[in-house]
Image: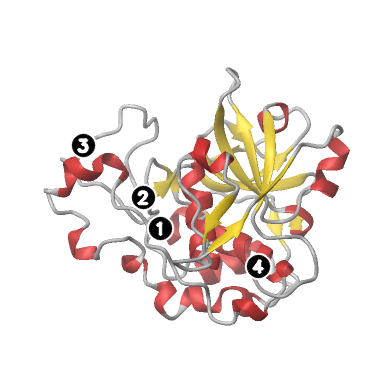
């Protein structure tokens, strides 16, 4: 049993942005049913812990001027991680909780149109005219969900939110494999969301024009909030307020899923990458 504070202390210890998470005190937490070391030990030591090895090109090439026109503001693409050692013997519940634990390790990273959270364009790099937050390290919504699944399980969805929303299969675990993706329609009643979605499911959101524009990770039964509401984990802009009335910073944070929230009012559908059921392996 572990609280979010312990998760952040462990997962962010080696992160370049560890200090950012300390500026905002979230009233929300996560209570895992697996020991944190079992969920994330290889993320804090070993090959997966080296943030400089997270892209599809070596770190020495990240800031080469020749790549400015090639990549633009988004920077290098993410590498495709192998499946974590021993994952084939683990339960789906372990895989779902590992996804959330991995995502919590990125809390504090800002909302950026990047593929890799550790990428920060130099001052003379091309800018993204649609980027509303100041330049820095971080991820946008669909690159966040894609990176988390990739780092956690070696499953690599596209970072394009509209294409991600239509996936029927996804690369991984590891290169040269694919896994099926199940589409689940929304429940008719708000009360049934908590029974329909499972931890780690992807919930897609439409903008006011009806186009797919956002995706979140469903935290589910392991989430804890002062008012008992369900939690999500996502990367988005500022303007959301927590249960204490404090504004939640932009970027990767835990947020509440309430019946009057944009998340609920504009919800589109659910994608399930980790299958339900007691079977071992991913």
Eye-nearest disc, 2 or 1: 2
Name the one closer to the observer, 26 or 276: 276
Q: Which residue is mark 2?
A: 137
Eye-nearest disc, 4 or 2: 4
Q: Which residue is mark 4?
A: 95
Residue 43 falls left or right of residue 79: right
Can the viewer see residue 204?
Answer: yes
First of labels 4, 2 by sequence position: 4
First of labels 3, 1 by sequence position: 1
Secondary element type, mark 4? helix
Q: Residue at x 69, y 42 (%)?
A: 270
Can the viewer see residue 23?
Answer: no
Q: Position of residue 263 (x, y in %)?
A: 67, 33
CB under 8 Å between discs 4 and 3: no
Q: CA distance from mark 4 to mark 3?
A: 38 Å
- Res 126 label: 3
Reply above or below: 108 against 93: above
Q: Which residue is mark 1?
A: 17
């Amino acid at each position: 049993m572990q609280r979010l504070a312990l998760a952040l202390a462990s997962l962010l210890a080696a992160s370049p942005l560890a200090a950012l998470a300390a500026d905002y005190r979230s009233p929300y937490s996560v209570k895992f049913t697996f020991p944190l070391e079992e969920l994330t030990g290889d993320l804090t030591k070993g090959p997966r812990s080296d943030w400089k090895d997270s892209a599809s090109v070596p770190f020495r090439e990240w800031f080469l001027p020749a790549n400015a026109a090639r990549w633009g503001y988004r920077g290098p693409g993410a590498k495709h991680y192998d499946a974590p050692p021993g994952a084939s013997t683990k339960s789906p519940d372990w895989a779902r909780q590992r996804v959330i634990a991995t995502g919590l390790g990125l809390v504090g990273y800002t909302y950026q149109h990047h593929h890799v959270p550790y990428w920060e364009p130099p001052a003379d790099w091309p800018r993204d005219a649609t980027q509303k937050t100041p330049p820095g390290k971080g991820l946008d919504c669909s690159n966040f969900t894609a990176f988390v699944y990739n780092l956690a399980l070696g499953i690599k969805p596209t970072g394009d939110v509209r294409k991600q929303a239509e996936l029927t299969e996804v690369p991984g675990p590891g290169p040269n494999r694919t896994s099926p993706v199940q589409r689940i329609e929304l429940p008719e009643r708000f009360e049934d969301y908590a029974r329909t979605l499972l931890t780690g499911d992807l919930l897609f959101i439409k903008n006011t024009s009806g186009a797919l524009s956002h995706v979140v990770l469903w935290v589910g039964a392991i989430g804890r909030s002062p008012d008992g509401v369900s939690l999500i984990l996502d990367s988005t802009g500022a303007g959301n307020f927590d249960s204490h009335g404090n504004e939640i910073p932009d970027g990767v944070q835990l947020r509440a899923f309430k019946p009057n929230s944009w998340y609920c009012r504009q919800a589109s559908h659910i994608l399930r990458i980790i299958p339900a059921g007691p079977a071992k392996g991913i």
